[in-house]
Structure formats: structure tokens, C-alpha cells
Amino acid sequence: MTVTEESTPVSHFERIGGAGSVTAAVELFYERVLADPELAGYFVEVDMAGQRRHLAQMLTVVLGGPNAYTGRDLATAHQPLGIPVAHFRQVGGHLTAALTQLGVPGDVIEDVQAVLAQVQEQVVAGGAGADA
């Protein structure tokens, strides 16, 4: 059997336009986060070029694109920051808004939100059961 374009499953990464679209989403996301007075403080002493690169790599993996991520795992990177659930949800809201603004299909956004829900305990202070 010959695999045709029609029978090859298309990843979310490909559906939204690949690396260029992920980069646009990351840029818009960080514009929103850095403009949010409740969240901007987390990034004061952060190498934002590196931060953007890491998020683009992670988002690419989440969307089914190639895995080039070599950074720290989520818990190692985030637990020392003491992030409350409310801030985690704000960040997720900014990501959803950025993806929506860029015209990303709803089913793709829902899948990204599902991944966010799965990793929440790795990111928020105190892990599982942490409250706002």
C-alpha cells in the first residue's frame, strides 16, 4: 500500500503552519504575559530569548512536531518559583488567547488546554492539590 497525503495523519503542528506559527504564538504569548503586572515579575531576571526558544520547543512537542527540547523538566524549572494556581491559570489564559488571536482551530486549543491541565501539578507550588 502506498501512503498518500490523504492517509498520512497531519499533526496539530502541521495544521497550524509549523515552526513559523509556533514562533508567532510564543511571541504573542510573551507580549501578553510580560504586560500582565501579576506575571511579569517571574521574568525579570530571565534570558527571554532562551525562554522563548524553550517554550517554542515545548509547544512544538505538545502540538506533535519534532522534539528538540533539551531544557529542564517542568517541575525543576517551576517549583522553586512558588507559582500559585491562580497565576498558572492566568498564564494558560494568555496562551489560549494568543492561540485564538492567531486563528488556531478550537480542537487544537482544547488539546493544548488538556496538556496544561495534565502538567499543572508539576508547575504550581506544592504540586497536587495546591490551591489559589
Image (cartoon, grey):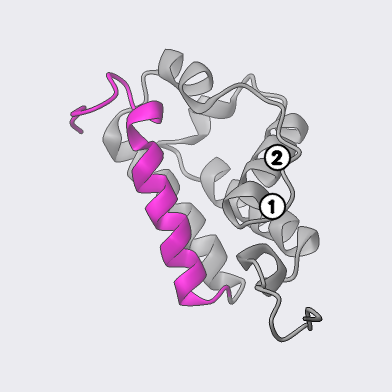
Label 2: state its secondary structure. Answer: helix
x and y, in percent, of residue 49 in the image: 77, 34
Residue 12 - label: none
Q: Amino acid at mark 1?
A: Glu
Q: Is residue 48 above or below residue 10?
A: above
x and y, in percent, of residue 20 in the image: 79, 62
x and y, in percent, of residue 11 in the image: 64, 66
Q: What are the residue bounds of the magenta stretch?
A: 104-132
> Which residue lies at the image location 70% right of the left edge and 57% below the top edge?
22
Label 1: state its secondary structure. Answer: helix
> Which residue lies at the image location 65% right of the left edge and 58% below the top edge?
25
Q: In which quadrant of the rendered image does the N terminus lie?
A: bottom right
Residue 52 - label: 2
- Please tell me whether residue 97 belongs to the stretch shown in magenta: no
Q: Mark 1–mark 2 contact, CB under 8 Å?
A: yes
- Disc 2: CA contacts within 10 A as few (<14), some (14-19) or many (>=20): some
- Disc 1: CA contacts within 10 A as few (<14), some (14-19) or many (>=20): some
Q: Is residue 119 above or below residue 82?
A: below
x and y, in percent, of residue 36 in the image: 47, 44
Q: Is residue 120 above or below residue 128?
A: below
Between the C-alphas of marks 1 and 2, the distance is: 7 Å
Q: Between residues 103 and 39, which one lies in front from this camera angle?
A: 103
Which mark sits nearer the N-terminus, 1 or 2? 1
| Magenta region, main secondary structure | helix
Q: Between residues 81 and 44, which one lies in front from this camera angle?
A: 81
Q: Amino acid at mark 2?
A: Arg
70 to the left or right of 34: right
Q: Which residue is mark 1?
A: 27
